[in-house]
Each structure stands twice: as C-alpha cells, then as structure tokens.
Image (spheres, rainbow, N blue to C red):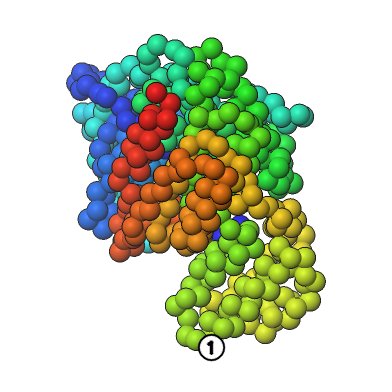
Amino acid sequence: MLRSQALALAIFVFACLSVPAQAAGLAGSWTGVWTKNGDPLPVTVTFRETEQGLAGSFDSDALQVSGIPFRDVHEAPPKVHFVLAGDATTSVFDGTLKDNVLAGDFVEGGTKGTFRLERLHGLPSTVQTRDVTFRNGDVTLAGTLLLPAGTAPHPAILFLQGSGPEGRWANRYLAERFAKAGFAALIYDKRGVGQSTGDWHKAGFEELAADAVQGIRFLQAQPEVAGKRIGIYGHSQGGTLAPLVARRAGDLAFVIGAAAGGIDPAEMEEYSVGNSIGLSALPPREAADAKVFVHAIVDVGYRGHPRAELDALSAKFKDRPWFFDPPPPENFYWSFARGIASYDPADNWRQVKAPVLLLFGKADERVPPGRSSRAIIAALKAGGNEDVTLRMFVKADHTFTLPSSGHGWPKHVPGYADVMIAWARSRTE
C-alpha cells in the first residue's frame, strides 16, 4: 500500500541464571531495560561471534518483536558500540562492559536515552528451530520451522505475510509463543525477500496464496505435525488473503484473521490513504479537496482510470500540507493495485468452513474495523459457517498498538497472543 505499515514482529523470552563473576566479553545473552523519556522498556539482547565478527539482536515482549538485528557491533574493552536501524529512526548505543553489566547511553534521532543490561546464562530452550525450504513452481520459499517440546505429532500454524517486503522475522514473536504453547509453527520469507526467490512486486494475491498453500503442504509432510490440525494466521494483507488460502488448502483446522480486509479493495485503500494524510482532522474545505485527490489515486490504481486527472490534481494541490506525490507511473504500486482490484473478500469468506477468529483494533487506521468485521461475519454465516469469534480491541490501531504520548515506547495490546493461542488450542484438541 502507499504508506509503510509497521510490522508487528516477535520475542523469545529466555529463562536464565546468573553467570560466574569471571565471565567476560560481549558474546552471550543479556537482560535489562532501555529507557527514554523516563519510560523503561524491558529487553533481552543477544550477541554472538560470527565469521564476519560480532553480531547481535534484541527481543522485547512489550514491542512484540524478536531477533531484531543490530548493525556495526564493536567491542573495544571496556567500550561497546552497536546500532539499531529501524524503518523510521536509527538508535546508536555506546556503553561500557564491567563486571557482567553492560550500561551506557543511546541516541534515537533527537532523543537521548540510557540502557543497563545484566549478563544471563540461558537455560535450554523448549523450542527447537530449523531452517527449511519449500517450492511453489519455480519459486523457492525459505523459512524457519519451530517445533515445541513434548510428544509429536503437534498441531501446527502457518503465518502469512502482510504487505510489502515482509520476511519471516515479522511473525517470529507469535511463532515462538505458539511453539511454546505446543504448536509447530512455520514462518517464511515472502517471495523475493530474504532467502526466498521470486519477486513479490510482480505477485498478486493468487500467487501469494499459492505460496502459502505449498507451505501448508510442507507442514502436512512433516512427521512432527498432525496433518489434520493445521491452521493459519494472517495480519493485514495476510488476513485479507487468509480465506483464499483456506479455500485452496482445503481442510484447515482454523483460520485467524487479524485486521483482515472484508470489503472492496478500492474502498479499503481510500480509507487507508485518507487516514494516512489525516483527512478526518482537516478543515471541511481542505478535507473535500483531499478526498477528491485520494479518490483520484484509487481510481487510477484500482479502477483503471487514465492518469491525466490525477496529474492535474497533483499540480493543483502540491502546496497543500496534506499532499504527497503519487508513485511515478512505473512504480509497482499501480500494477499491484490493478491485480488485486477484482479480489472479492466476501466471496472467499463465504467458502471457508473452518472455525474463524477475527481480531481488530477499534482504532484501525488502515482497514475499517466495523465494516470489515460485519462483512466477514455475514459472508461466513451466509456460507453456513457459524463458528466465528470476533475480538475487538478498544483503542488499538492497525498493528494492535495502543495510543501513547509519542515520547516513550509504543505499547501493544496485552494478551494479544494469549487470546489467539487459547482459541486455537480449543479448535485443535
């Protein structure tokens, strides 16, 4: 879509013991807090030696992320330096390692913060992981299979990707939570991302759904997996694709759709783009012009209208504070929009027979939660499927993040993963 969406990614929480006093060096696991503007964020940080030198990553349950990598990790005892490069900001950490405590300062844009981490020894993980590949025609999809402790075969879940170049790490947090709860979990890089071949820019919903179906077939072939107890989870574009995947896959045990689009793709895009420029907060005359501009973008992208009117409006509105340059004609956005314009979410949901859990944030700014949830539920029931559960999280946005003052760390809906796991377990026991 036109504006990048924050990805909700995963955390691995380590059980731990204190290490002996003689431990030295940066490699290992650490736990503590990063603090900015007086707001502490609990984190687990891991550094390791590689052939290319030191590497590191962090996990945070509060942010619902796991394995987010650092750049430029350097150790010149007692000094330590590492960098976290995000989608919107870059944080530079500089600290000192002394007596198994790593502490110092970081700078994120114009904001300064502090960090303090203590070394840990991790107990053996209850989750096993292995890198895997599977194929859809001439495309090779690369991913990670997470396997729980306990006696196999296990119920399983496949995670679909959202829009854009989303890799397996986007769903790592939820995959680990499900694996710890007894589910095998498969996460994979979207075609053309990470270690997967192909090109997501040139793939429509049909191709992406076919990739996911091959992932389900891969799971069904694993001896650790109970082939009749496999479900899927999709957020945003993944949730919108979920009923198509369910139709093609056949006998799924469950379907979880988070912020899933249930209405015409063009209408969803108008809602999303309008919110991205703050249309509802504009004065009436500005809002009317902005609405015309957004409608013109969607007309070109989803309805095949000539670009001349959009270009004329761009010239007319270019000095308005809400204006942004539409993608150039050669941008993949236009071909992708035309490719998904005829997708009918309701028709696909009508044909889903598996139990369905729908999750929405009431303040979703990308998918209209009320209209989408009502449309999906109506379609399911029209198809004879009465096993549908809706959970609407008050104040949560598209990424299930709660509103904040903007000065501290973003907070996600508490219990989000717990709701899904409990429901999925009830459908696979």
Residue nearest the viewer, comparing 58 with 306? 306
Point out residue 428 in the picture as x, y percentages from the top left corner: 43, 26
With respect to residue 55, does 317 lie above or below? below
Point out residue 191 in the picture as x, y percentages from the top left corner: 66, 37
Number of disc labels: 1
- Residue shown at the point (71%, 47%) measured from the top left: 204
Let me know if residue 331 appears in the view.
Answer: no
The crowding category of the residue bearing disc 1, from other C-alpha atoms within 10 Å (few below 14, some 14 to 19, many at least 20), is few
Point out residue 339 in the picture as x, y percentages from the top left corner: 74, 53
Point out residue 407 in the picture as x, y percentages from the top left corner: 31, 61
Please identify the residue farthest to the bottom as the structure is shown.
285
Let me know if residue 429 appears in the view.
Answer: yes
With respect to residue 257, does 284 lie above or below? below
Name the residue beneath numbered marker 1. Answer: 285
Task: Identify which amino acid the numbered label 1 is placed on.
Answer: Arg
Q: Secondary structure at mark 1?
A: helix
With respect to residue 259, does 198 lie above or below? above
The quadrant in which the C terminus is found is top left
- Residue shown at the point (48%, 55%) measured from the top left: 373
- Residue shown at the point (54%, 12%) measured from the top left: 223
- Say which quarter of the image contains residue 109: bottom left
The quadrant in which the N terminus is found is bottom right
Residue nearest the viewer, comparing 178 with 220? 220
With respect to residue 99, does 71 lie above or below? below
